[in-house]
Amino acid sequence: MTTKDGAKRGTTRRGALATLAGGAAAASLPLWARYTHAQSAEPIRIGFQVHRTGIGAAYGRWYDRTTQAVVEKINAEGGINGRPVEIIAEDDGTDPKRGAEVVEKFANQHGCDIAFGTLFSHVVIGSAPRAGELKLPYFVVSEGHHVASGMLNRYTLQPGITDVKSQVQAMAPYVAGNLGKKVTMIFPDFAFGHDHRDYFTDAIEAQGGQVLAHIAIPPTETSFTKYFPKIPRDTEVLYHVMVGPAVLTFVKELGEFFGPSAPALFGFIDSLEAVDIASPGLEFLEGSYFWEGNPRYAQSDQTIYDKAYREAVGVDGNGASVSDPKDVSTYAHMFGCWETLYVVKAGMEAAGYQAPADRGKLIEAVEAMTEMPEGYAHPQGAKLFNGKTHQVFGHQYISQVKDGRLVRVHTTSIDDGAYPDEVDYTKHPL
Amino acid sequence: MSRAHPVALHLGFLAVLFALGFVLPDYHHGNLARVMVLATYAIGYNLAFGYAGLLSLGHAMFFAAGMYGMGLAIRLFGADPALAMLAGLVAGLVLSLVVGALALRTAGVAFMIVTLMFAQAVYLTILLAGEWTRGDEGFVIQAAERVVLGVDLTGAMARYFAALGVFAVGLLAALRLVTHPFGKALVAIRENEERTRMLGYDTQRLKLGALAVSGTLSALAGAAYGLLFGYAGASFAGVQYSILPLLWVLLGGAGTAIGPFVGTLFMFYLIDLASGVTTAYMLIAGVVLVLLTLFAPQGIVGGARRLFPGWFP
């Protein structure tokens, strides 16, 4: 050993001991490395809150298939931070009480790193307070405005699907410019319908249009004939968002009421998710327009990303299961599971996520995201994430029913669905 | 057999629950907090059904009255949570008196149907008043709004002991009532209303009293549930939440003070465990209920009461 001044020093006892210790540590390095590897090879555990039973079961079935497909793909690509992803699924019965219990189960029993996948708004709103208290990142795929409205908390995010306010607002320019400016709205008389009523009314007025009448249908109604005479005669566009089993009756009775002289029909595909558009009784929808979160039928200009996504999940060109053409998917929404898990992967890798102690870093990493280009991770299209409101914004699609198929006629810009921030979650404590 | 000490037994039971608050693992700690609040609801139900023989199919309206009375007081008026709890209790009391005054003109199957219809009316009112209630979606009671008398109810320990406090109030109130002449008179009505009336009791007034106490306890549970878990939603007013307390009480033992807790706990874990095995977990719950009805028609605590008479009033 040579010092700065060039003087040589002999081997000391302390130095020899240190060298020996260093040698022993070096010799045992493979053991340490194996231990470290064993630590990091532990799977990332993702609690999947799935609507297996209850009113959301049809959505839940397809959310499940999409989630299984994307996890298989992510694992084939090396997992997250080199660790495999494991899905721990629990049925929430589409019930907010059970939903909150399931979130607790993920955090406290299964030891999940995050929770993910909830669709129905009431389950999200019932579960989110517990996720926030448990500091469990909760990635919802719900399209509700609850996240961006500021109602929830810093641990709840929606980075994989746009919200209803954005979707509805983005429809107004096309409706006013192509279908008509005098609109009558028919909607179920509960929160989902009220969101459409409020957001679309404002949006169409901003386009120089007006809503002539709001017709709210009580949730227990099974026949709609008595409501149709309330539709003003000078209505140019009938905006409808009926959901649930009664939608088939609704469309049939609407057809019987109007015959061939109906105003233009515009609806949200939510009404007919998991329902074959060519079902008997739905003939009246021919020529009508729908919002689609993601086009159910493979379009003539289908992207390679949609093609790959469709194949991975097992959906044919008509939006049905490849193994059962009658099993129609919830194609307009379920891409949100795929894209959300890719956001989780990107967030965990940016945060260097290792263990639940890093959950706060994960939230901050996702909040720092902005542009999400269209690609295999985002097959529905490019998106822009707003870290302050925890909500993603993206393109919306308008399709027309032609020969019993939904054919895309318009793609909105991301700006069409933009609105001012209503909350800044980044100011909330972690 | 030694002389029964039911009060000591129930106080001992509360002491065990208190001690469990310090030792249970996180997951079961949270579950037990839920179970205690829901068991308070079942105790309320049991007062009407188990003691007075009033089979209601609409008790969710009282649970929801408490939840929304509390929740809306905070959401619309920014009320202090302690005052909001009181608002929930008053809502439950008033609703039970109004419903009782009308529904108690009927009996038996008609009473079941009338209470079911009233509950449906309350449920639809919550949906239709969406501007204030957010309808089926419900609303969050924010963490900052859940600090009662300086205690932050978002913490696990605070939540557990608050739930235990609510449950203790329910259990001891029920125990006091059923060992009191009022409770004995209710049992007499259940067994033979005609004869009770002949003995000089105003059975109509007693039944109204039973329903009022039952409804108010249910409302206490509803208000506490909303405040402890941060959410008020219309699903809690649905028919499912009217049927559940009936099942909990039948399972645990109708007409026993502690039976509702046992039934609620049993059902909670039955569903929790069965849902991990199959999506048809309600089928499993149904089969177990049928088996219990066949082999233990008095419920779990009802069976224990036969073995230890006097201990389980």
Image: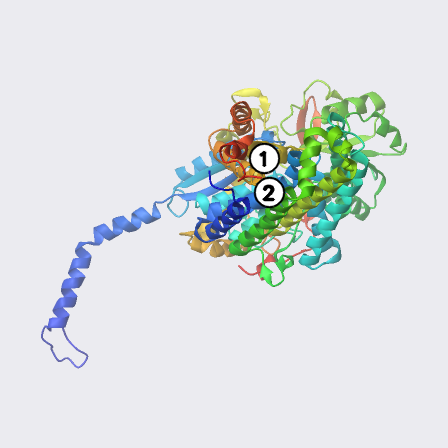
Tell me whether circle 2 and circle 1 mark residues in contact (CB < 8 Å): yes
- Residue sticking out furthest to the right: A233
Residue at (80, 23) in percent of width and height: A253
Dot 2: what SS?
helix
Crowding at mark 1 (Cα within 10 Å: few <14, some 14-19, many 20+): many
Q: Kindly identify which chain the residue marked by label 1 belongs to.
A: B
What is the quadrant of residue A411 in the picture?
top right
Query: x and y percent of residue A221 in the render?
Result: 78, 29
What amino acid is labelled 2 in the image?
Leu
Residue at (82, 46) in percent of width and height: A205
The residue indicated by pointer 2 is B38
The answer to whether residue B85 is above or below residue A41 is: below
Dot 1: what SS?
helix
The residue indicated by pointer 1 is B248
Query: x and y percent of residue A275 in the render?
Result: 65, 25
Residue at (11, 77) in percent of width and height: A9
Can see residue B268? Answer: yes
Q: Nearer the viewer, residue A291 or B189?
A: B189
Crowding at mark 2 (Cα within 10 Å: few <14, some 14-19, many 20+): many
Residue B134 in the figure: left or right of residue A387: right
- Residue A170, label in figure: none
The answer to whether residue A412 is above or below residue A29 is: above
Query: x and y percent of residue A13 in the render?
Result: 11, 72
Query: x and y percent of residue A418 in the render?
Result: 68, 50
How many numbered marks have been drawn onto this rendered protein structure?
2
Q: Nearer the viewer, residue A397 or B211?
A: B211
What amino acid is labelled 1 in the image?
Trp
